[in-house]
Amino acid sequence: MKKILNLVLICSLMTFSSSAAISKGTKKTEKVKKSEEIHIVKPVKTKVNKREEKKKNAEVANSKKESAKEAEGMYETKFPVINSKIEYSDMNGEVTLSDCIKLAITHNPTIMSAISNAEIYKSKVGQAWSSYFPTLGAGLSYSRNDMLMTMTGAYGNMMNRKYNMYYVPTVSANMLLFDFGKTKASADMAKRTYESSRYDAEMNIENVIYNVKVAYYNMIFAEIQKTVYEDTVKDFELQLKQARAYYNIGKKAKIDVTTAEYNLGNAKVNLIKAKNTLELASVQLANAVGIPELEKVILKDKLNTKAYDVNFKNLIETAQASRPSLLSAKKRMDAAELSVRAAKRAFTPDVSAFGSYNHGGSKVNMDYGYQAGVQLNYTNLNLMLLKKQVDEAKATYKKYVADYEQERQNVYLEVKSAYISLMNSHDSLDVSKLALQQAKERQYQAFRRYQVGMGDAIEFKDAENSYLNAQLDYYSNVLNYNVNAAELERVIGAPIKESSVDL
């Protein structure tokens, strides 16, 4: 009986421990599941002040309008007047090159940044001249004094009292009268730096316009390329139809049909690539203009086919007088020369006037006082420091002289390279135009021979591919001619003359 009871007790304990373990495991599983739950953090909604937002947008729009007007004026000082009146909100999908230039000047953030940077340096000119303006000060003070007196007697009793002291108000002024040219040298240096930043802004504008022109020309070429591949597809479709007709009547072998299908498939693949290239060119044009939404537009202009009348000697002279980067380097060199003058004049003293007036006393209107005078003083006179600052200014000037010479040589190289590229593309046009005429005639003859059963599929394919490549080569040379002309305008900083001679 005792053994039976022990057995029952052991079984009950085992059952209890297993149930407890199961419950703990269940709790752990629940904890794991709870920890693995994904909680989506909702964005915090910030309250927008519509009035402030509207005011901010109006200020940005006004700033863009002013920057666009300034940039357009800077561009039109050397290049033809932009005759476009287009606005992005009123676009109907058709744009000319002038329209794109107008939109780029109005919307491209690079131009806005360059104009704003020039305005920053313009403000520094006024900051330099501000040393000659008076420095004003005003203050209002109140004090309550409880004097500690150690004297005795009648005098001590008279002075040992509590009283309030007012200083209401205090006005002071300081003004520089003469500093032996230090302020003028600093202002002249700031002016040269500002003029340099203006030329940098011009360079940015011309770079943006160059990118717009290149993107516009590339998109025109992409459209022409798509048209060429569409015509090629039509020619191979016609050849496939002809091959099937000959095969059905037993005049041509099956291989002609297979070859024609293969050629048509390749042509369709090339057409798909051409369409993708056109879409990419549209995006690149939108990016160059500065309006990403400006996609799938219709271009009104075509590639220029008029020859340019250029002379290398005249181009170099124009570049030296108009190239913004060269003029900017010249202004930086002039500013560095003025910095040497300013550093040397730091040895001279300053002559200034000062004055102050206060009103008050133990009572508000009890008394008044004033002070006025002229002083001659040196500020932080450290001869060793001033000497090293002059040495630094001289070394800086030498650096900018070398930089100017390097920029002058770079301008010569760039103008020469752009001129050679323009001449090469011009000379290549005559050859590619003749090759296009010959390839077109050969393609026509090969197709006619195939129509009458005298030619074969391989002859037609070779003639068709030769005509395709000749077209692309000719239009590619026209594209290069236009791009090289735009590059030449960019490197000389001025337009080049277009003649009435057709290419």
Image (cartoon, rainbow, N blue to C red):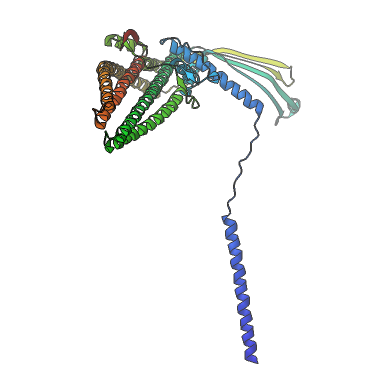
Does residue 104 appear to the left or right of 151 in the view shown? left
In this picture, residue 345 sits left or right of residue 13:
left
- Of all residues, the one furthest to the front in this rendering is 249
From where the camera sits, is residue 184 visible? no
Q: Residue at x 58, y 63 (%)?
A: 29
Image quarter where the C terminus lies is top left
Q: Is residue 158 visible?
A: yes
The N terminus, quarter of image? bottom right
Indicate left or right for 252 with 24 as reference: left
Q: Position of residue 160 (x, y in %)?
A: 74, 28
The part of the image, by quadrant, that contains residue 144 is: top right
Q: Nearer the viewer, residue 262 or 285?
A: 262
User: Eyeballing the image, is 194 above or below 295?
Assistant: above
Which of the 4 quarters of the picture holds residue 136? top right
Q: Quadrant of residue 13?
A: bottom right
Q: Residue at x 65, y 19 (%)?
A: 170
Residue nearest the observer in this picture, 263 or 454: 454
